[in-house]
Image (tube, rainbow, N blue to C red):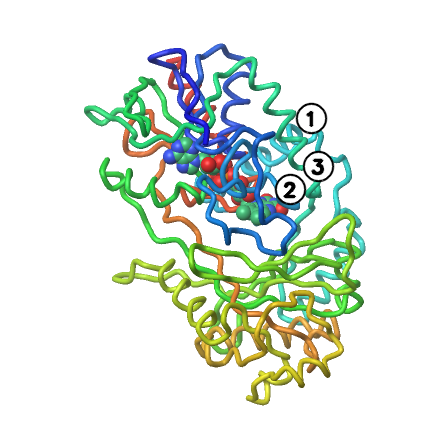
Amino acid sequence: MTSRQKISEESYDVIIIGAGPAGIFAALELTRKNSWSVLLLEKGFDMPKRNCPMRGEGLVGCEVGCRPCSITCGWGGAGAFSDGKLTLSPDVGGWLSDYVGRDSLERLISYVDGIWVEYGAPTTVHGGDQDRIDEIRQRAMLAGLKLIDDPIRHMGTDRCPLVLQAMREDIGGKVEVATRTVVRKIMARSGKVTGVELQDGTRIGARVVIAAPGREGSAWLVEEAERLGIPTANNAVDIGVRVEVPSIVMAPLTEVLYEAKLLHYSRTFEDQVRTFCMNPEGFVSKEAYGEVITVNGHSYSDRQSGYTNFALLVSTRFTEPFKKPIAYGRSIARLANLLGEDIIIQRLGDLQIGQRTTPERLARSAVEPTLKKCTPGDLSFVLPFRHLRDILEMVEALDQLAPGVNSRDTLLYGVEVKFYSARLELSSDLETAIGGLYAAGDGAGVTRGLVQASAAGVIAARAAIAKLGA
Ligand SMILES: Cc1cc2nc3c(=O)[nH]c(=O)nc-3n(C[C@H](O)[C@H](O)[C@H](O)COP(=O)(O)OP(=O)(O)OC[C@H]3O[C@@H](n4cnc5c(N)ncnc54)[C@H](O)[C@@H]3O)c2cc1C
């Protein structure tokens, strides 16, 4: 293991914590027109040294326990080895419109999208055939579904690291970057930020600090917020299943949209249920959150499965006094792990008539599971009645748009859980109650995707420029 890089100065105009999209775009913005001294600190490895022994094994996350984990840490942040889907809608990938408003967010998305393309993202955007999209939207409305406009620029697993590396090479000459460097504390005096303290005790001064530590650093950031007296609030927790159907069933949607983002408000509970992370011709995979295993899905440019998978997620935002949505989500995932060893698979038809899927019943299914290591079982022993009801009602609605989804052989994998960091209380330009301390990206609980995280970095950087200039 290498030790942290040497840092040349004792004080900077701006320190950025985390080299994910939020931190990188903050650095890019700060260096576009100005010559502030900027230090970017990243606990993981630089791009060429990021290496995960589990990549390609169908498990994203960890069975090995590398520290730092090269999937979530290092230059490029959590999405460096992802499919790299740049979702270009203000309704997807975060809650920044709560801070800057929808129009301003649309302009920001267009701005950061241009920068992704400048560094090598492809020029093609999926979801541009407006006539066919409008036709799907109309049919969706009749089925009680809302189609979210979401043009996607798809970088792909191969291209995403190359684009991030191009940003690295450009930034390298203008900003000091220190990888393998963990920030332990954010320092403040009299309500103003003064710098950061590293894990080895080194203190570095700064007039502005932009904290963008991603989900990897979200628990740390919440602890720091509590220590510094910055209020936080619960975020939602999304719980559901991954659905797998023959690709032909979803083709009317995926051929036009690649990924169809659909929202439904369930009849019984009026809960919001949404489709998430649709993978045409994809593969179902596992994801590890510490000791908890959840389900996920991927698609590759060089392998096609014949099946499409997507998540159906029920979104819940708990109210007072409950403050532990992540613990709630984890305990449901743990229940599936207890009953099914890790992931439970069930035919939809078995769930509907209240019987367990057995290996024999699964073998009779027309859908062959793309995730081989999972246990045929009964998801009704795992998911709360509310979630189960919501999901079954969403499946019925979806079937009107893509006939065949509500079929006996459709496979459900459980459980899929999406945890979001607690939200720090922030001003409209993402400044905390500590003057000069900004929080951006997934770690601050304000975004959950590459594009909005990039936009958050730009918002914080522009505010920092205004503050430094003043
Ligand atoms: C497998 C996977 C696939 C994904 N696919 C997509 C996709 O296709 N499209 C999409 O829009 N989104 C995708 N996402 C989500 C996307 O990656 C994130 O929303 C985005 O990376 C968030 O950016 P960020 O800069 O806020 O945080 P991150 O990208 O998480 O970066 C934060 C960085 O901060 C560093 N850090 C944390 N704490 C410290 C500390 N104390 N000191 C120093 N450094 C620290 C971390 O090492 C990390 O590198 C995916 C995520 C994963 C995990």
Between tags 3 and 1, which lies in front?
3
Mark 1 residue type: Glu
Where is residue 156 drawn, in percent x and y? 70, 43
Q: Which residue is mark 2?
A: 86
Per the rendering, the mark at residue 350 is: none
| Secondary structure found at label 3 | helix
Using the numbered discs, state the Cα–Cα distance from disc 3 to disc 1 in whole angstroms: 13 Å
Where is residue 189 drawn, in percent x and y? 21, 24
Between tags 3 and 2, which lies in front?
3
Mark 2 CB near ligand 1 (8 Å cut):
yes
- Mark 1 and mark 2 lie on one chain; the one further toward the N terminus is 2
- Residue located farthest toward the front when viewing the structure as drawn: 1
For the residues bearing labels 1 and 2, Cβ distance under 8 angstroms: no
Where is residue 373 drawn, in percent x and y? 61, 68
Whether residue 449 is visible = no
Where is residue 152 drawn, in percent x and y? 69, 45
- Taking the spot 47% from the left edge, 69% from the top edge, the residue there is 337
Using the numbered discs, state the Cα–Cα distance from disc 3 to disc 2 in whole angstroms: 12 Å
| Secondary structure found at label 2 | strand
| Secondary structure found at label 1 | helix
